[in-house]
Amino acid sequence: MSHFAPIKTVKYFTPGTLVVVAFALLGWSLGLYRMVVGLQSVTNLDNQYPWGIWIAIDVATGVALAAGGFTTAALAHIFHKGKFHSITRAALLTAMLGYTFVAIGLLFDLGRWYNVWHPLIYWQGNSVLFEVGICVMAYLTVLYLEFVPIVAERFEQGVQFWKPFRFLEAPAKGLVAGLNKIASPAMSLLIIAGVVLSCMHQSSLGALMVIAPTKVHPLWYSPILPMLFLMSAIAGGFPMVIVEAVIAHRSFKRPQHLKTLAALSRYIPVILGLYMIAKIGDVLIRDAWVYLLTPSTESIMWFIEVGLGVVTPFVLFLLPWTRRTAGRLFLGAALVVGGVMLNRIDVFLVSYNPPYATWSYFPTLLEVAVTVGLISTIMLLYRFAALTLPIVEADEGGAS
């Protein structure tokens, strides 16, 4: 059975960490500035282009890349593949942080951000966006409940708060213990609920664009867009876990889970192959392939997305050569992750063209800075959690 413990041999602050802190502070400062002055003064969004990189990257891409949480949990707990328990906690942490900052990114994007609570009160069952919002909020709650036993385990090992906050130590311990009494017995139900909720809103994000047939380029517009979004998110789940594991273990100077990651990678060509068949088959059946014969921004982006993000890693993961080193696994997994990211950017930005638009959207430097700031904050919180909570196996070994 795996034994997890905080990483106590690594310092939190390094020169690289300080650079990331600077990016995070800049991003949050500009995000708060946007809250005060509004969207128009900070972004290039308007009535023609009501969304930009905050939706395409912070929300749509963030949700897709957080799929590693529910796919790994399903593999380890629902399908009882016990050898993957060693990477499940890290995948859960990545998903929890990812969804948290998806919600924050959406908050920055909302014109009247102070009305974000409205879907909880004013229900609209005919709205796809309502379903996405409710599912994301519900799944985020499930993720935090799934994470409670990890925090409770850390309190059981002994926790001493920083002196100015020592008075919060006993109340925090009591709160965590109480939540753990609720979460631990219901863990199986929480994992199943997480899988169901994830599948619902992953597909619904694609359904958002189905209602805009005149605004989305034919290479990406499809009646099966919800299924393609779900399949691509699942296909990107395990690769994202591999990317996160390789980067984290190298940063913390820990031995890689080479055998575990190699075993996990065996599932990737199967899932990615199914998505590739659906993606290419959809273009052929709808006769949208004719747009690929004409050189354009859209056709070039489609070839990059499918060629580098789907076909190339599919071939790589079929080869035993790829599974022999962490670096090769990282290369193949990074291509899949990049393909999923590019797909969301293509659907929400590249392919989106309002019929009466008089200009093309391009993000401001302030929009980019806020996005970089959010990503930087995720990195900082992940590092803090790994160093203070039992996320990583205490004695991994190079071949674990």
Image (spheres, helix red, strand yellow):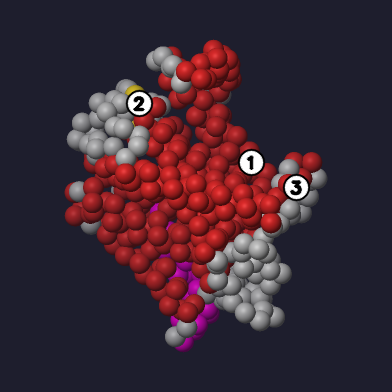
Q: Report, in whole angstroms, how far the alpha carbon at label 1 lies from the one at label 3.
A: 15 Å
Residue 245 appears in the rendering: no
Could you say where residue 189 lies in the image, as x and y percent from the top left? 56, 29
Could you say where residue 204 lies in the image, as x and y percent from the top left? 62, 54
> Mark 3 or mark 1, which is nearer the start of the sequence?
3
Is 284 a magenta residue? yes
Residue placed under numbered mark 3 in the picture: 115
> Is 313 situated left or right of 177 in this image?
left
In the depicted structure, whether residue 138 falls above or below residue 168: below
Could you say where residue 324 lies in the image, as x and y percent from the top left? 19, 49
Residue placed under numbered mark 1 in the picture: 137
Q: Where does the magenta region start and end?
A: 271-294
Q: Residues within 10 Å of mark 1 (few under 14, many from 20)?
A: some
> Is 20 situated left or right of 29 in this image?
left
> Is 98 situated left or right of 400 in this image?
right
Q: In this orientation, which residue lies closer to the viewer: 164 or 156? A: 164
Q: Which is in the foreground here, disc 1 or disc 2?
A: 2
